[in-house]
């Protein structure tokens, strides 16, 4: 029997998250530990991450009004440039994304290796997806977020105001609440453009 058509990189990455029900326990737990160690709190994540990056990693954060990129890391000068034109919740996410590579890199690489993916493009795409997962988990730590979601009856707007993040960030995090023994409502999150394309 001939093998089926080769799957595209994004399909393999999608299947990785699907097989885990969009929940990556290793990254959730690492993010919760960092959230506690850095003394973070809702609506205080942005300044907390600025301080943590400086104290723990010697990284200076500059909110840049000249660069078009949302985030750019200058390794040589240990400087993280974050766009000054995005919202504070988005700035916190971009700093958390950098911390995914600085603090959760070994966990991420272990997950990629365990997935037995051979193509570099697929591995790179999964690395980005896992880093983004960690960033979301750091900005919205699992236990705190689930408790607040239940207290607010899963009201997306109230959750966004409580944690200081946008609508899409809350929706994405709601789709990851599948921790055994502490599951949230099993939301499925899709993005659809104006033409109806998923």
Image (spheres, grey):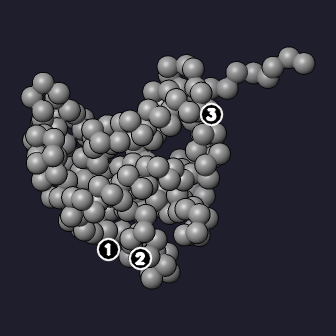
Please say if 12 is above or below 6.
below
> Which badge, 2 or 3, comes first in the chain's sequence?
3
Q: Residue at x 45, y 27 (%)?
A: 124
Q: Can residue 60 be seen in this view?
A: yes
Looking at marks 1 and 2 on the same chain, the residue that comes earlier in the sequence is marked by 2
Q: What's the mark number on residue 11?
A: 3
- Name the image quarter holding residue 39: bottom left
Percent of width and height locating residue 69: 24, 35
Residue named by callout 1: 162
The residue tagged with tag 1: helix, strand or loop?
Answer: helix
The answer to whether residue 122 is left or right of residue 76 is: right
Mark drawn on residue 138: none
| Circles 1 and 2 in contact, beta carbons < 8 Å | yes
* SS type, badge 3: helix
The residue tagged 2 is 148
Give the position of the C terminus as an image quadrant.
Answer: top right
Q: How far apart are marks 2 and 3 (CA)?
A: 33 Å
In the rendering, at what x and y percent does residue 94 appear? 28, 46
């Amino acid at each position: 029997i001939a093998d089926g058509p080769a799957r595209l990189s994004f399909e393999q990455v999608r299947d990785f998250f699907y097989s885990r029900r969009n929940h990556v326990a290793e990254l959730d737990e690492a993010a919760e530990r960092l959230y506690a160690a850095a003394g973070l709190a809702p609506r205080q994540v942005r300044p907390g991450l600025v301080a943590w990056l400086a104290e723990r990693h010697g990284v200076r954060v500059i909110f840049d009004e000249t660069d078009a990129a949302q985030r750019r890391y200058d390794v040589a000068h240990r400087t993280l440039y974050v766009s000054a034109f995005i919202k504070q919740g988005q700035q916190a996410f971009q700093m958390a994304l950098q911390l995914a590579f600085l603090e959760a890199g070994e966990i991420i690489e272990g997950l990629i290796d365990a997935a037995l993916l051979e193509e570099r493009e697929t591995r790179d795409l999964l690395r980005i997806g896992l880093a983004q997962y960690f960033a979301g988990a750091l900005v919205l730590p699992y236990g705190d977020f689930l408790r607040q979601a239940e207290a607010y009856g899963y009201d997306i707007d109230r959750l966004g105001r409580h944690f200081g993040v946008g609508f899409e960030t809350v929706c994405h995090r709601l789709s990851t609440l599948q921790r055994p023994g502490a599951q949230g409502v099993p939301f499925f999150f899709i993005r659809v453009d104006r033409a109806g394309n998923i």
